[in-house]
Amino acid sequence: MEFEKREEVWRSFLKTWPESRVLKMTLEEYVSTGDKETFTYWLETKTRCLGSIKGGSSEKFGIYKRADGNSLNNRAGFYNDPIYTWNLKYGPDSKSAFKSVKNNIISVIDAIKKGDLSSIEEIDLAPTLKWKIAFIYQDRNYPKILNIYKDTVLRRSVRDNSASFSKIYTELLRRKPADVSILRYGFDVWDGNKDASAEDILEFIRKMDIRELEDFSPARKQDLFYLTKWAFDNKLDIFSSSVEDEFKIGRWSSSNNEPQFLFKRVSYKKKSIKVDGEKFSLSLLNNFEHELQGFLERHSVSRAGYWPVDYIEEDSFNSEVEIVSDNELKGVDTLNSIFYGPPGTGKTFHTIEAAVKAAEPTFKWERRAELKQEFDRLVNERRIRFVTFHQSYGYEEFVEGLKAKTEDGTITYSVEPGVFRQMCSDAEQYQAESPAGQTYNFETCWQAFVEHLANEDFIEIPMAKTSFRVVDFNENRIFFEKSNGKTDHTLSINTLRAIFNGSRTYTTGLGVYYRPLVSFLRELGGTDEAPATKRKNFVLVIDEINRGNISKIFGELITLIELSKRKGQLEALELTLPYSGDCFSVPDNLYIIGTMNTADRSLTMIDTALRRRFEFIEMMPKPELLDSVVVKGVNLSKLLGTLNQRIEVLYDREHTLGHAFFMNVKKCLDESDYDAAFEELVHAFQNKIIPLLQEYFFDDWNKIRLVLGDNQKNESFQLILEKPVSNLSLLFGQDHNIDPYDEGVIQYHLRGGKEAVWREPMTYICMYSSTIPEQSHSESDNKLEE
């Protein structure tokens, strides 16, 4: 559902149930059977698109009306009269019980109007009920509540098993990007932290290739699932260990087919999961963040992480698919570009090409292997570097921040450059070409200065009419005294180096001290023989650029990345960094290439400042790349085109399916391996397409059936079976209250992976056609089964 329609549902609820009506609400208006206008029906069913509280029984409402007057709740703590069942804590009879429940609802509304989340914590109502009420009645212009009411999802989102709802909502709202609506943000958080489904867990066990995990408790499976998902999302590899009940997380070398860099060891038992010997909890992942960033910067890759099953599957390390055959790539003529589109459209694949093309514009290649070899060389030279944005990524990691150190029991803070500043510094050294010859070398001159200062209490630096004294220095700053006082002042060594090398100008303010100090250093250190310098381009690739808070990460530097404001351009700008005080600009030989998955966030939701400064290169599904690709009668171009047309109608074009899902099928067909090609088609649907559709449609199996065309097929070719549950009482007894409004409950069943329907060509042909097509290949291996 589009978010504009969700907003309309929100307005409709408030129009139907304003506060004034809640104050006068009767028991019959609160809860009933068969009445779709009651307060509880609106909360649970009509506003499900604002966050679901469906599930469990009607006990969460405090008092409810039974569909069957003879169906009694005989649980301790509950009481029944001929019509209603209620929790005895609310009162001895239905009238007094409802009065207590209504008063509590009114208290929730009053509290959220005041923004008092801690008071809501104390109100005696079921958590899902009271927090959804609070969400709906909050000030929509200044929201305090997110449209998520499930404790496991909320706590997973902040990686804290013990945090209260109010604390979690406050933290999540602090992280919310300013340009993202509360509803959109809520669903983004839900998508990233929702409980793993049974299908997710089974797929996880398969990928881990550890059958013993099937015997673990659901809670332990969930813990292992999210630990490994966290690793995989950060592009870490997971590989087995020689130690029993252990696996490792780190970086696997595809060239040597062996573990190359270890990040963490995970030991797992039925009752205990430990990471490097420490008991696992969600909060433990927070402790790893700084260590992880350093690891990823040292051992960056562009590919996704490997699972244990990848190491035993044939040719798993050469599974990248080639989508474009030529080596002329568009979109790298600009310094700032972003590849965007749905999953499977080749964004990462093209990023490798774009990065090489930007770093070495004259490089040509005939085969993909040659391109990859050049890419690896540039990565090793640190001319191409990768970073992944996420919600907690900030300015300190990207540009510069303070790092605490302990020396002799004393805590000191030093400024540590982030990946962006490091790349700017590296690029600056190769921004201009220079011939070999005599030149001043900063390191040589600085070393002479250090040796001179070691033998003196201070060094007097002459100025035009006066002087100043350098008295000390550390790894980042120089300490000096002016001639007319003893107050300590400081200069940045990085800025001094930049002015010395001619890459900075500083004519005002502290420039009066930098310039004479530069002259002194040159006179003290003399000249060196300098090699010729050739201009080189550098590339920073930002994966998932839309997942970061752009204003938080770039800060004031968002202006400096503009093409006209880059160092080397006529309108070049430089700013003073807040932590180090250094002057800073972005050189015009640093390319920034971003990728964004439109299934995660629409392009319309992207930070305006980012949109104005980047060229956006759309990468949409290309069914035409699959033209004439037919496997056992299944026309892949028609199949992909039809599926995407249905998705566009039911959702939008940004959530379509990419052609890359079927490129391995094409690869097998090119090699005339028709059985393997069909198995690749089955694999794509089982492990990629259907799980992705589950994510897109929030497990709405009816819509998934519509996308797959199951509603139009004979049952023998349906992948998802639909079955009405005719008699709930046989399953749950008389007092189930699961379907109090007699809407009918539908069960959906996804066919098991080994069932014959998956390997029946008509299953896929009927997704786009009701007739059996003529054979497109004469080979017997590629004919329809008779």
Image (spheres, helix red, strand yellow):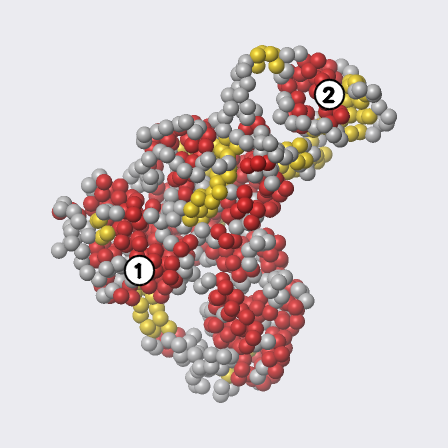
* Camera-side residue of 28 and 75: 28
Q: Is residue 699 left or right of residue 718?
A: right
> Residue drawn 61% across and 82% down?
24
Q: Residue at x 56, y 49 (%)?
A: 608
Q: CA distance from mark 2 to mark 1?
A: 73 Å
Label 2 amino acid?
A: Leu
Query: On the rendered structure, is 294 left or right of 721?
Result: right
Q: Give the label on residue 708, or none.
A: 1
**Residue 92, position as x, y percentages in the image:** 59, 83
Quarter of the rendering occupied by the C terminus: bottom left
Which picture quadrant has residue 431?
A: top right
Residue wearing tag 2: 517
Residue 324 place in picture, x, y as percent: 33, 39
Give how far across and how far down residue 568 sits, in percent: 58, 29
Whether pointer 2 and pointer 1 mark residues with C-beta atoms closer than 8 Å, the reply is no
User: In this orientation, which residue lies closer to the viewer: 715 or 201?
Assistant: 715
590 over 348 or under it: above or below: above
Quadrant assignment, res 509: top right
User: How packed is label 2: few (under 14 Cα within 10 Å), some, or many (20 or more)?
Assistant: many
Q: Quadrant of the N terminus?
A: bottom left
